[in-house]
Structures are given as structure tokens and as C-alpha cells.
């Protein structure tokens, strides 16, 4: 054990104030991250056109793969790092943290090389038509060039929270977001660089945000900081396994976007892809609030699980459930309210796109009633270091149910079936989530049993 003592914010008793201290900055941070995508889309749709907007959606699988790797290492690694902190193994936590950063960015370099070499072929494989291909290749090129930075940005967002510095995570995101907006205006609005300018602006915004985080992690006075890496294969494999659900979720969203694009192109052409993109942007305003809420809580869950404090785990779980129920209703109503505004902002006078989006979002918005529960359950089991169960939940909801829906529902309801797919898959995902939360409540002790147990220790080979 490492008996080095630090002022670890994760060790404080949990209450609503504690949750707000960790979750509110994280929610704001995630909204800023989402605004990267939304602002890009807003400038692209208004200055370049809806075809250019559709091209960004064509590339969602590439975006999902790059982001998914970062989120996998971030969520899987932060749970293990926080658990080690709960066990008092601070030096081991810092060594693992550093090795995770280097390994993930190494994968980012592979994306850079492969993507730049096969840019056109990848875009065509993803379904880019001759009309959309020039936009796709321009945007994708800079996605690949900034891939290592994008991955580091995902890691830093999560690990700043694990370090007990959610406010710094928010500051970094705001700085990156402001940079992105200003550069979008400069590159797209003034210089007329089109979708290429949007991709460059996003990448440079991530450079600013990641640079701020790097300064924090280089300070050895912080409880979590960069140090000489020790590449323990067992710990890295556990990180990947534990975070696999987040990679599955991200990849599934990319794969389903691909399927939705193919379906929309088949039924209504490029305008359908643009309408679906507008619906996704509406979700992007609300989804990060759920994600940020539970990202903020996740290190608290992992720390108290490592400490063996079941009373605190139950308190965290109960509080999250109450807040989840309230916010699900609020966010459903909010999506209904913002839908007309989002259509007006992104349709850019294209009445065919606007009409498709108006009709579809009435159906699409019902997914908000179940979305939060599914995000919470997956995040909660990842925080408990049960990456396999989290992956099963994510894989079932984000891929199996969606793929089944996208093939079956249009056969019964035509175009409406495409819009129904996400609400239906979220509904069945919620049923599965509740089932697993009930089954495992006694094993992990969040079901109200306050019998204290010893901390969860790593295997002997890891000590």
C-alpha cells in the first residue's frame, strides 16, 4: 500500500452538494464538447449547404471510432485509477494513468496514418455519394490528422474529474469551445474554407483544451499527475475490458448512423440524411447533460467501491435514481421545445429537409424518456469495474435492438419506422437495464444493505 496522504476530494462523504460539485461542472463541460459538433454543423449548413451537413453525418462512424477509443481508455482507466486511490495506492494510480495516456495516443497515431492513406476509399465505403464525396474527404482528412489530440482530449476530460478537479475540466472545455467557435467563423464565414475549415477549427479547439489539461497533469503537487510510466499489461487489459462498453456504445452509434444514412438515402435521398442529422444535433444538446451527470458521479462510485463503503454506494445510487427520474421528464419536454428552433437553424431554407425533420422529431423525442436510465446503468457498472456487464447493456441497446429495429420497423411503418427505431431500442434497453440493476444490487451493496466489507484488492501480481 502507498500511505502517501493527499487531500482527495473523492474521500469526502456523499451528499447533494458533493454530487453537484462533481456533476455540474462535468455537465457544463459535456455540453461544451457537444457544441463543438453543433457549431460546426451550424456554420456548415448556413455557409456551405445541407449537402455539406449530410457529409459530416456520413463520417459519424469514423468520428465514433476515434472518440470511442478515447472514451474507452478514459472511462475504463479512471474507474481503476480511482479504485486504486481508494485503496491508498496513489503511486500505482499515477503510473497506470501515464501508461494509459501514452497507449491511447499511440493508437491515435495509427488512426492518423491509416486514415490519411485510405481517405477516399473509407468515405466511399461509408456511403458517400458522388454529390457528397468532396465534402467527406475534406472533412475526414483533418479528423485523422487530429486523431491523437482528440483522444487525449477525451482522456483529459475524464481524468481531470478523477483528479478531483471538475472545475478545471470545465475551464478547459470552455476555452476549447470558444476557440472552436471563433475559428469556425474565421475559416468558414470569412475565409470560405468550407467543411475543411470546420474540421480544422474543431481540432485546434481540442489542442487548446488538451493543453490546459496537460499543464494540470504535469504538476506533481496534484493527487493525479503524469509520472514515469510503468506498462503493466494486466492493468492495461483491465482498462480496455472495463471501458469496452463505452467503445461499444460509441461504435454502435457510428454503425447505426451508417444504417440510418443508408435507409434515408433509400427512402428520401440526401435530404433525409440532412433531416436525421438535425435530429441528432437536437439530441446532442441534451445527451451530454445525462453523460456529464454520471461522469461526475463515476469516480465517487469507483472510490467507494474500492474502499468497501456500501452505505455510500447505496446513497449515491438512490440519489442518482431520483434525479434521473426528474430530469428524464424535464429533458423530454425540453427536446419538444427546442426542436422547431433547431430545424429553423439547420435547414437553411430547405423546406423538404425542414418538413422531414419536423415530422420525424415528434416521434424521435420519446427516446429521452429512457435514454438517461440506459446511460446511467452502463456508467454505473463500468464504475464498479464490471466492464463486461456494461458492454452487454451497451451492445444490446445500441446495436442489437437498433439493428433489429432499422430492418424490421420500416417494413411495417415505412419512413416512420426509421424514426421509431431509436425510441423503441431505448425502451427495450431500459427494461434490460432495470433487470440488471435489480439482479446485482446485493452483490455490489447499493441495494440498501449496509454491511461493511473490506476494500476490493487487486490480485497479488498487481501489488
Image (tube, rainbow, N blue to C red):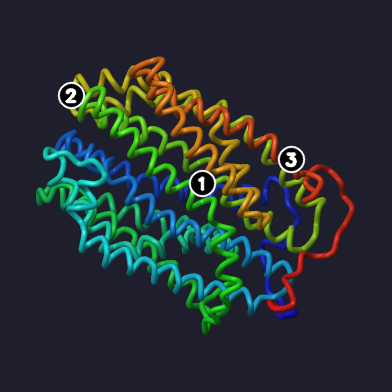
Considering the image in quadrants, where does the N terminus appear? bottom right
Q: Nearer the viewer, mark 1 or mark 2?
A: 2
Neighbour tally class for label 1: few under 14, some 14-19, many 20 plus, Cα within 10 Å:
many
How far apart are the alpha carbons under marks 3 and 1?
A: 19 Å
Q: Earlier in the sequence, mark 3 or mark 1?
A: 1
Tell me the residue at 28%/46% (across/down): 59
Residue 163: horizontal and vertical position, in percent? 58, 66
> In the drawing, what numbered circle is on residue 27?
1
How far apart are the alpha carbons under marks 1 and 2?
A: 33 Å
Q: Earlier in the sequence, mark 1 or mark 2?
A: 1
One can see residue 352 in this view = yes
Considering the image in quadrants, where does the C terminus appear? bottom right
Residue 280: horizontal and vertical position, in percent? 37, 34
Q: Earlier in the sequence, mark 3 or mark 2?
A: 3
Q: Which quadrant holds residue 203? A: bottom left
In this rendering, position of residue 330 left or right of residue 172: right
Residue ID for mark 3:
318
Residue ID for mark 2:
350
Amino acid at each position: 500500500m502507498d500511505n502517501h496522504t493527499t487531500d482527495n476530494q473523492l474521500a469526502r462523504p456523499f451528499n447533494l452538494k458533493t454530487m453537484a460539485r462533481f456533476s455540474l461542472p462535468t455537465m457544463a463541460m459535456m455540453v461544451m464538447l457537444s457544441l463543438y459538433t453543433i457549431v460546426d454543423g451550424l456554420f456548415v449548413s448556413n455557409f456551405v449547404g445541407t449537402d455539406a451537413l449530410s457529409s459530416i453525418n456520413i463520417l459519424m462512424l469514423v468520428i465514433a471510432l476515434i472518440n470511442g477509443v478515447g472514451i474507452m481508455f478514459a472511462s475504463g482507466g479512471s474507474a481503476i485509477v480511482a479504485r486504486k486511490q481508494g485503496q491508498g495506492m496513489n503511486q500505482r494510480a499515477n503510473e497506470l494513468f501515464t501508461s494509459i495516456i501514452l497507449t491511447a495516443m499511440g493508437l491515435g497515431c495509427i488512426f492518423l496514418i491509416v486514415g490519411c492513406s485510405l481517405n477516399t476509399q473509407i468515405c466511399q465505403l461509408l456511403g458517400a455519394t458522388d454529390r457528397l464525396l468532396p465534402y467527406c474527404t475534406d472533412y475526414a482528412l483533418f479528423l485523422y490528422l487530429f486523431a491523437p489530440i482528440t483522444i487525449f482530449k477525451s482522456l483529459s476530460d475524464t481524468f481531470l474529474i478523477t483528479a478531483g478537479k471538475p472545475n478545471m475540466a470545465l475551464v478547459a472545455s470552455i476555452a476549447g469551445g470558444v476557440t472552436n467557435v471563433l475559428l469556425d467563423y474565421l475559416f468558414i464565414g470569412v475565409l470560405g474554407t468550407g467543411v475543411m475549415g470546420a474540421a480544422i477549427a474543431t481540432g485546434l479547439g481540442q489542442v487548446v483544451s488538451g493543453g490546459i489539461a496537460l499543464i494540470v497533469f504535469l504538476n506533481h503537487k496534484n493527487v493525479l499527475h503524469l509520472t514515469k510510466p510503468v506498462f503493466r499489461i494486466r492493468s492495461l487489459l483491465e482498462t480496455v475490458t472495463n471501458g469496452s462498453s463505452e467503445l461499444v456504445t460509441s461504435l454502435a452509434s457510428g454503425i447505426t448512423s451508417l444504417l440510418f444514412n443508408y435507409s434515408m438515402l433509400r427512402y428520401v435521398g440526401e435530404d433525409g440524411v440532412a433531416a436525421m442529422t438535425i435530429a441528432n444535433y437536437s439530441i446532442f444538446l441534451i445527451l451530454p447533460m445525462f453523460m456529464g451527470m454520471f461522469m461526475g458521479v463515476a469516480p465517487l462510485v469507483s472510490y467507494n467501491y474500492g474502499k468497501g463503503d456500501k452505505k455510500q454506494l447505496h446513497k449515491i445510487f438512490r440519489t442518482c435514481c431520483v434525479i434521473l427520474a426528474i430530469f428524464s421528464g424535464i429533458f423530454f419536454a425540453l427536446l419538444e421545445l427546442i426542436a422547431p428552433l433547431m430545424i429553423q437553424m439547420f435547414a437553411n431554407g430547405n423546406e423538404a429537409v425542414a418538413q422531414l425533420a419536423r415530422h420525424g422529431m415528434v416521434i424521435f423525442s420519446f427516446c429521452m424518456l429512457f435514454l438517461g436510465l440506459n446511460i446511467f446503468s452502463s456508467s454505473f457498472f463500468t464504475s464498479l469495474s464490471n466492464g463486461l456487464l456494461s458492454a452487454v447493456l451497451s451492445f444490446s441497446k445500441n446495436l442489437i435492438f437498433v439493428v433489429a429495429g432499422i430492418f424490421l420497423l420500416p417494413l411495417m411503418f415505412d419512413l416512420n419506422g426509421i424514426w421509431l427505431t431509436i425510441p423503441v431500442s431505448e425502451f427495450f434497453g431500459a427494461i434490460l437495464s432495470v433487470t440488471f440493476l435489480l439482479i446485482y444490487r446485493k452483490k455490489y451493496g447499493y441495494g440498501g444493505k449496509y454491511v461493511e466489507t473490506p476494500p476490493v484488492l487487486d490480485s497479488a501480481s498487481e501489488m
